[in-house]
Image (tube, coloured by chain):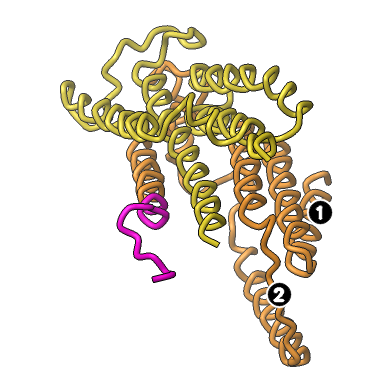
Chain colours: A yellow, B orange
């Protein structure tokens, strides 16, 4: 009964242990290269959230929440929102809302395009942690309802 | 040609998702429709949209399966099949008639009426320095729209947390 509560079978756990880091790394790659290749903050953030959801489905709720607890998740999501807004407001330094005030650089370099990579990182934090929070809350609510019945 | 095949596949998947009796099979048919939409975006040369559609589809599928896997909703079978079929055919006929007159007036695919996009494409790389024109548009020229989308997502997360909260909930069994 105890082992049944903690996620799926040994095969799923082993495959998850091998792949979850790669999925997380791929999400970070998509976010950081959002201004160079297809992808961007939204898609990369969803991939990051999927890596944590993968961990939660295979190992159970406690293991995933140990990596990213709910309090830390809400802090990270609010941090993403505030970062995006403050980048937008900092544009008033040069004149108007959402001004691209940083150094532009050469196209096709990793450090180029001014504020666009920073906006991508902020959006990925917001989207990834937000969707993970929605999933955690839905699963927790189901477990709570089963306990009551 | 491939686009028409994929559209046909998506219509078939949607019809199966509505008509099938098992809830889990219906969810999987919806997932097949989403996968077809992702392939359609790839054929129309929009890889950004294809990636986003694919990952969001996977996430929605996982959440829907977790939500529906233990529930068995009874299927409502209405007796008025004649009225239902007639009204459906009537609405399809209305839609086709109006679509015939409206779609003739539309500009051709790839030749839009608005000229703003042309300016974005020609002056995007030197104005923003971003190689990906989609990122340049959604985070520089039209960043205000993206801020609105982020607000929508933030509000959605707050709404889910407020509806599903544990603290302050009135117990049913009392």
Q: Main secondary structure of the magenta part?
A: loop
x then y, percent, for residue A31: 50, 22
Res A60 seen here: yes
Rounded to the nearest angstrom, the CA distance separating label 1 from label 2 is 27 Å
Horizontally, residue A109 falls left or right of residue B63, namely left
Q: Nearer the viewer, residue A80 or B44?
A: A80
Residue B21, by quadrant, is bottom right
Res B139 seen here: no
Figure check: B129 above or below B6: above
Q: Nearer the viewer, residue A6 or A73?
A: A6
Q: Which residue in the structure is indicated by mark 2?
A: B74
Binning the other alpha carbons within 10 Å of mark 1 as few (below 14), some (14 to 19) or many (20 upward) gives some
Figure check: B50 above or below A28: below
Residue B173 covered by magenta stretch: yes
Question: Residue at left 29%, top 14%?
Answer: A102
Chain letter of disc 1?
B
Chain letter of disc 2?
B
Mark linked to residue B9: 1
Q: Nearer the viewer, residue B172 or B150?
A: B172
In primary-sequence order, the first of circles 1 and 2 is: 1
Residue B32 covered by magenta stretch: no
Q: Nearer the viewer, residue A147 or A122?
A: A147
Figure check: B59 above or below B106: above
The magenta stretch is B159-174
x then y, percent, for residue A83: 29, 27
The answer as to whether the residues below labels 1 and 2 share one chain is: yes
Binning the other alpha carbons within 10 Å of mark 2 as few (below 14), some (14 to 19) or many (20 upward) gives few
- Which quarter of the figure is the C terminus of chain B placed in? bottom left
């Amino acid at each position: 009964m105890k082992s049944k509560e903690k996620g799926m079978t040994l095969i799923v756990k082993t495959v998850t242990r091998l792949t979850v880091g790669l999925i997380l790394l791929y999400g970070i790659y998509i976010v950081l290269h959002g201004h160079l290749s297809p992808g961007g903050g939204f898609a990369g953030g969803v991939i990051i959230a999927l890596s944590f959801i993968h961990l939660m489905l295979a190992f159970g709720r406690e293991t995933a929440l140990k990596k990213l607890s709910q309090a830390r998740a809400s802090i990270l999501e609010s941090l993403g929102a505030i970062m995006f807004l403050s980048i937008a407001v900092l544009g008033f330094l040069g004149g108007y809302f959402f001004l691209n005030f940083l150094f532009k650089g050469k196209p096709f370099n990793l450090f180029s395009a001014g504020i666009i990579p920073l906006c991508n990182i902020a959006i990925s934090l917001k989207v990834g942690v937000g969707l993970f929070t929605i999933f955690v809350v839905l699963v927790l609510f189901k477990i709570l309802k089963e306990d009551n019945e | 040609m491939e686009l028409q095949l994929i559209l046909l596949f998506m219509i078939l998947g949607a019809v199966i998702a509505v008509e099938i009796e098992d809830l889990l099979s219906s969810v999987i048919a919806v997932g097949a429709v989403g996968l077809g939409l992702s392939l359609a975006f790839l054929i129309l040369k929009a890889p950004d949209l294809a990636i986003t559609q694919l990952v969001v589809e996977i996430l929605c599928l996982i959440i829907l399966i977790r939500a529906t896997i233990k529930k068995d909703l009874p299927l409502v079978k209405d007796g008025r099949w004649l009225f239902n079929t007639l009204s459906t055919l009537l609405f399809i006929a209305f839609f086709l008639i109006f679509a015939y007159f409206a779609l003739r007036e539309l500009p051709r695919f790839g030749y839009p009426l608005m000229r703003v996009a042309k300016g974005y494409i020609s002056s995007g790389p030197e104005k923003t320095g971003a190689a990906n024109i989609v990122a340049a548009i959604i985070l520089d020229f039209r960043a205000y729209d993206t801020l609105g989308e982020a607000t929508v997502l933030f509000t959605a997360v707050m709404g889910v947390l407020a509806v599903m909260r544990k603290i302050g909930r009135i117990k049913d069994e009392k």
